[in-house]
Amino acid sequence: MIPTFVIFLREGVEASMIVAILLAYLDRIDQRRHFRDVFIGVGAALVLVLGGGIAAYLIIRQYDGSTVQTVFETITFLVAACVLTYMTFWMQAHSRTMTADLQRRSEEALNGRARWGLGLLAFQAVGREGLETMVFTLAIVFASSTQAATASHGHGLLFGALLGLAVALAVAYVIFKLGRRLNLGLFFRVIGIVLMVFAAGLLADAVENMQELGWLPFLGHPLWNTSAILNENSSIGDVFHSLLGYADHPTVLQAIVWVTFVAVTATLFIRNGHRARASAVSTSGAVAVRIDRTEDPATAAQGPVGGPPARGG
């Protein structure tokens, strides 16, 4: 439940935030008649992604227990980890300019008088987030199905996804109504760190599969065995496995990959965030200095408040 909740919350917030920005901009310029085009684009993207995800899952399930399934799961783990990492750093770099970019592209679509311009813009934005969500969800399902493949567990994953999506829609409504009063920067920073750990777990799962396939025939001996304390086949163990990459008997290579990935990506993510905030502060300070230097000369010539006018040289 927790992994799907986190993924659907994060991706849902980003996708709904994009839609909220588009709707707020159209409302501000009195173009509410184009709301329908945006909703059509969103709906088409959701139908396409949902259909593609179900089809991919049903097709690969036909090879249950075979080498083909293991290879496909390994590729899914690697792709999901790469996309998770990329989109987390991309969001960190572009979050400050996203609103302006979306408004510019909306203006271009309106000026181009293309009937489906705004719909295509919404389709592209939501479709990208939906495609990422589909890959992540498949990775979670594959990682979980080998641990606690029960009906109640499947219901838990579905409930987590629906709950995350509901919270994301609520956040989007707040964004649409309150605008900048919501601290999304803090939200994406916290979720970004969580997703770095989640991506490390996917990489560890991929390493485990590749060692089973014989693609990585080294450092394969178990580092420890905690199955008597917390078995990864249990419900709680599966939650830790899906969210954090926990394994009750990980190999040395799995542990090295997990620790290295978390250490490097988390350090870069935090450092880039500090640099971005420091750059924003220095930029605002420079703007304030420029404004102060362009003060009206007549005002400056009056000297201090209550004092005589400044004498000319």
Image (cartoon, helix red, strand yellow):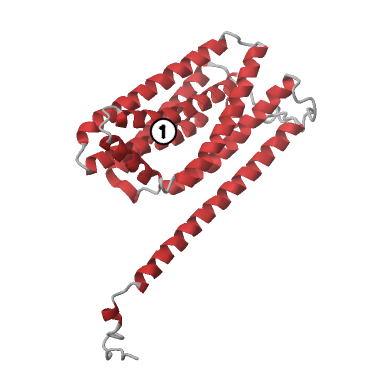
Q: What residue type is labelled 1?
A: Gly
Q: Mark 1 points at which residue?
A: 12
Quarter of the figure with residue 127: top left
Q: Residue drawn 44% across and 48% down? A: 185
Q: Which residue is drawn at 62% across and 14% down?
A: 69
How many marks the image carries: the answer is: 1
The answer to whether residue 20 of the structure is visible from this angle is: yes
Residue 212 in picture, x, y percent from top left: 73, 20
Q: Residue drawn at (31%, 30%), measured in percent from left and top?
A: 117
Residue 249's place in the image compared with 193, above or below, is above
Q: Position of 71 compared to 171: left or right?
A: right
Image-based side of 209 in relation to 98, left or right: right
Dot 1 falls on a residue whose secondary structure is helix
Q: Which residue sits at x=45%, y=45%?
A: 94
Horizontal arrangement in the rendering, residue 211 relative to residue 96 (left or right) = right
Residue placed most toward the observer, 254 or 112 = 112
Q: Position of residue 171 (x, y in %)?
A: 36, 39
Residue situated in front as seen by the camera: 216 or 254: 216
* Residue 231 appears in the picture as rendered: no
Rendered position, 176 above or below 164 = below
Instruction: Give residue 43's position: percent from left, percent from top.
Output: 33, 24
Q: Residues within 10 Å of mark 1 (few under 14, many from 20)?
A: many
Is 121 left or right of 188, judged from the image as shown?
Answer: left
Q: Quadrant of the C terminus?
A: bottom left
x and y percentages locating residue 42 in the rendered image: 34, 27
